Image: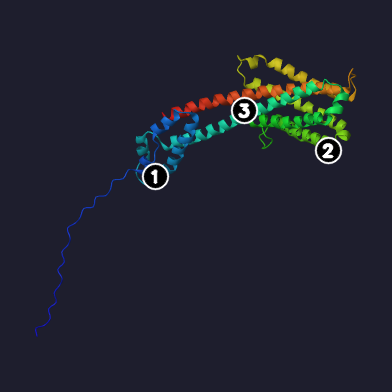
Amino acid sequence: PPPPTHHQPTTTNPPPTHHHQPTTTSPALSCLVDRQTILRNASLSPASMLTTGRAYVTGHVDCEGQALNSAGPQQPHAQAKQSGVTFVQLHQLVHDFHDYKLMNRRKNLLLLYIFLVLLYVGLNVALLGVNFESQEFIEENYYTAFHMAAFWGVFAFTLLEAFILISTETVHWWVGADISWLHRVQSLVILFNVMFSFATAVLFSMFPEEFEVPAHYMEYSVQVLITAVNLFFVVDQTRDANPNGLIYRLRYVEFTVALLVLALSVLQILIFSGAIPTTIEAERAAHFCEFTNEIFNGLFALMYAILAYTNVRKTIVHHYKEMKAAVE
C-alpha cells in the first residue's frame, strides 16, 4: 500500500473587519448642568429654585468630579468652559442654595418667636386687668391660677429671650477663648435668668401657701436682670441702624425707657417688702409694677424680633437675586 500522506489543512485568513467604535460624549461635558433648565426653575419661585436647582447641581457635581478624575492628560477645564458652567461655579451654587435654606429656616423661627412674644404680652395685659380686683377677691377665686400664670410666664419669656439673643448673635455663646468679657457677662445673665426663673416657678408650684413670699422675692430679683436685657436690645439696634433711620434717631428715647423700666423692677421689690408704703395691699401694688414691667419687656423683645425678621427677609431676597444672576 502506498505510504499515508499527511494533508496540511489549508486555512484562509478572514478578511479584516472594521469595527466602528461608538462615539461617546465626554463625561466632563455630559455631566454639566443645563443652565436653561435651572433658569426656568429659578424664574418660578425661590422654593422651586431651591428644590429643582439644588437637585441638578448636586447631581452633576459628583458626576463632573468623576469625569475630571478620569480625564487624565486631557483638558477637562477647557471642555467645561465650552458648556458655560465650571466646577467652581457649580460648587458655589450648591453653597448658595445651602445658605438660602438656612436663612429661610431662621426667618420662620423668628416669625414663630414674634407670635409667642405677642402671647406673653397678652398674658400680662390680662393679669394686669384682673389685678384691679381686691386682694381678698383674688385669693378667694383665682389665687393659684393667677400666680401660676405669672411665675411660669416669666420662665417661658426668659427662654424666648435667650433664643432670640443667641440665634441673632446679639449675645455670643460662652464658648471659646476669643469671646470678650462683655459677651461673657451677657451669656451669664441670659443663663442665670433661665435657671433662676425656672427654680422660682417650681418652688411656688410645690407649696404655694408656704413658698409664696420667698418665690416673689426670687422672681422680683431675677426680673431686674430680665429688664436689664432690654439694654442689650437697644445697644444692638442702634449699633447696626441706619444713621438716617427712625431707630437711630430714637435711640435716646429707647434707652431712657429701658432705664425707667429697670428702675420700675427695682421699685417693685421695695414695694413688696414694705419699704415704700402704699395705700393698697403691698403684694397687689407690686403686681401692678410687675405686669407693667413685663409688658414693656415683651414690647422691647417684640420690636427687636420684628427688626431681625425684616433684616433676614431682605438678605434672603438679595441672596435669591444673586443666585438667579449666577445661572443666567
59, 280: nearer the viewer: 280
Tag of residue 323: none
For the N terminus, which image quadrant? bottom left
Task: Calculate the distance from the C-alpha at mark 2 to the C-alpha at mark 3.
Answer: 34 Å
Q: Is residue 11 above or below residue 22?
A: below
Seen from this angle, which residue lies furthest left? 2
Q: Is residue 87 left or right of residue 304?
A: left
Amino acid found under the numbered disc labelled 1? Ala
Q: Is residue 57 left or right of residue 293?
A: left
The answer to which quarter of the image holds residue 188 is top right
Return the residue at label 1: 67
Tag of residue 111: 3
Element marked by disc 1: helix
Return the residue at label 2: 206
Q: Is residue 66 left or right of residue 155?
A: left
The answer to which quarter of the image holds residue 120 is top right
Q: Is residue 64 above or below residue 223?
A: below
